[in-house]
Image: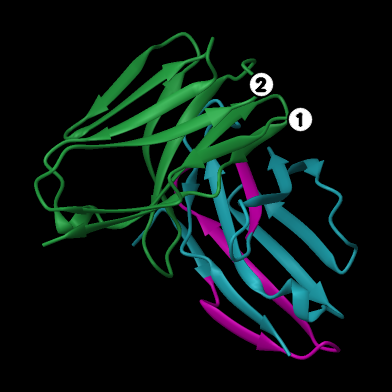
Chain colours: A cyan, B green
Amino acid sequence: ETGVTQTPRHLVMGMTNKKSLKCEQHLGHNAMYWYKQSAKKPLELMFVYNFKEQTENNSVPSRFSPECPNSSHLFLHLHTLQPEDSALYLCASSQEGVKSPLHFGNGTRLTVT
Amino acid sequence: KQEVTQIPAALSVPEGENLVLNCSFTDSAIYNLQWFRQDPGKGLTSLLLIQSSQREQTSGRLNASLDKSSGRSTLYIAASQPGDSATYLCAGGGADGLTFGKGTHLIIQP
């Protein structure tokens, strides 16, 4: 079992649907992240949580809503998405922000139809 | 704002060769430089982290260097193997988080 687990692995949703992505880390880390990976673009940081507090919101549209109920779990709630939101969504965790190595999950491949 | 560039975008070499992947960054005020590997359809795996005060880090056949003054890092892979085929990404860690390059897609030919 990897240290960071993401579910589901694949998700297809219509533009009017509401869905959630889940991330769980078993590493005892204090920081958790959501990244978006689109074809031919660098990874884009979306949200950062340190000790369950959101410390970064990288100008992400409000149709993406994060939730961090505890230091081990992170959710990304999705609603009224656009086709250009189709991408690989990666969750990561680290012990001490970016001063320590990030550990990534295998991602959720999202397709918006 | 930090910008990270990786050259080349793609590289194909025969098995057994030593190779170098390049990474450049614009803001030298970084905490560290991290190298990752990504296999198709998977997440990223951390390979090496070089602190800003360090010049290099080694792990097995991998050696990463950091030159803050020139804004460059290299990842050296010795005696390449087909299992090394993947996309390699570098990222600069700083006050505004971790900034990634687009990656180098590496193919090792058997």
* Tag 2 secondary structure: loop
* Tag 1 secondary structure: loop
Q: Residues within 10 Å of mark 1 (few under 14, many from 20)?
A: few
Tell me: B93 left or right of A55: left
Query: Which residues, given as a range, are shown in magenta?
Result: A7-36
Magenta-span inclusion, residue A8: yes
Q: Residue at x 72, y 65 (%)?
A: A76
Q: Residues within 10 Å of mark 2 (few under 14, many from 20)?
A: some
Q: Residue at x 57, y 19 (%)?
A: B31
- What's the amino acid at mark 2? Asp
Precedes in sequence: disc 1 or disc 2 = 1
Q: Can residue A96 be seen in this view?
A: no
Tell me, yes or no, whether dots 1 and 2 are on the same chain: yes
Out of A3 and A40, give the one closest to the viewer: A40
Tell me: B110 left or right of A35: left
In the displayed structure, A76 sits above or below A94; it is below
- Quadrant showing the N terminus of chain A: bottom left
Residue A57 in the image: x percent, y percent? 82, 46
Looking at the magenta stretch, what is its main secondary structure? Answer: strand
Chain designation of label 1:
B
Q: Residue at x 15, y 46 (%)?
A: B80
Q: In the drawing, what numbered circle is on residue B27?
A: 2
Residue A69 in the image: x percent, y percent? 72, 55
Q: In the drawing, what numbered circle is on residue B96?
A: none
Out of A90 and B26, give the one closest to the viewer: B26
- What's the amino acid at mark 1? Lys
- Quadrant showing the C terminus of chain A: bottom right
Residue A82 in the image: x percent, y percent? 82, 79
Query: Which residue, given by chain and number where applicable, does mark 1 sit on?
Result: B1
Q: Is residue B94 visible?
A: yes
